Image: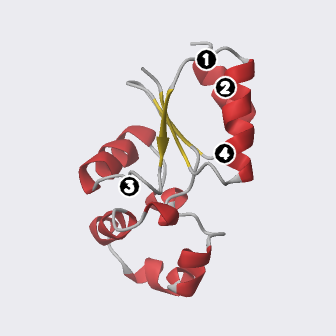
């Protein structure tokens, strides 16, 4: 089953949930703040996504800014970045849409539609 990982108070996540519901797409909802992704999950999603690791960071989030990650990430290894992401779900860009064959990060309706129709 499709996993929809979000933060319910996030307006982008609310729009994404509405999009899934409007398109009659079944999913399992997971609150990223209550159920933080593990290092193993993040590593698997990162590898499956084909995206640069930095795309998994919520760069507009308060925690990202307060930790000054804009300046720290370039000096970190991929392994260190994944370990950091696993410490707090609020560091992770959302929503995440996870299937056996793909991982989508952030709401890009055209990309979501393309993946859902395959």
Horizontal side of 109 relative to 78 (left or right) equals right
Q: Residues within 10 Å of mark 4 (few under 14, many from 20)?
A: many
Tags 2 and 4 touching, CB below 8 Å? no
Q: Look at 38% across and 38% down and name the residue there.
A: 48
Alpha carbons under labels 3 and 2: distance apart: 22 Å
Quarter assignment of residue 83: bottom left
Q: Which residue is mark 3?
A: 36
- Numbered disc 2: secondary structure: helix
First in sequence: mark 2 or mark 4?
4
Residue closest to the eye, 70 or 66: 66
Q: Which residue is mark 4?
A: 13
Residue 9 sits above or below residue 99 on the image:
below
Residue 105 sits above or below residue 110 on the image:
below
Where residue 10 sits in the image (x, y, percent)?
68, 54
Q: Which residue is mark 2?
A: 20
Q: Look at 74% across and 51% down and name the residue there.
A: 11
Residue 95 sits above or below residue 24 on the image:
below
- Numbered disc 4: secondary structure: helix
Alpha carbons under labels 1 and 2: distance apart: 5 Å
- Numbered disc 1: secondary structure: loop
Q: Which residue is mark 1?
A: 25
Where residue 2 sits in the image (x, y, percent)?
47, 24
Tags 1 and 2 touching, CB below 8 Å? yes
């Amino acid at each position: 089953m499709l996993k929809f990982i979000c933060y319910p108070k996030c307006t982008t996540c609310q729009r994404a949930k509405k999009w899934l519901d409007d398109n009659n797409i079944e999913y399992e909802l997971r609150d990223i703040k209550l159920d933080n992704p593990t290092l193993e999950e993040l590593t698997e999603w990162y590898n499956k996504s084909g995206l640069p690791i930095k795309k998994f960071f919520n760069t507009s989030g308060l925690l990202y800014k307060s930790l000054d990650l804009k300046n720290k990430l370039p000096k970190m290894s991929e392994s260190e970045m994944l370990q950091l992401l696993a410490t707090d779900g609020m560091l992770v860009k959302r929503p995440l849409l996870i299937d056996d064959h793909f991982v989508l990060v952030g709401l890009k309706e055209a990309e979501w539609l393309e993946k859902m129709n395959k």
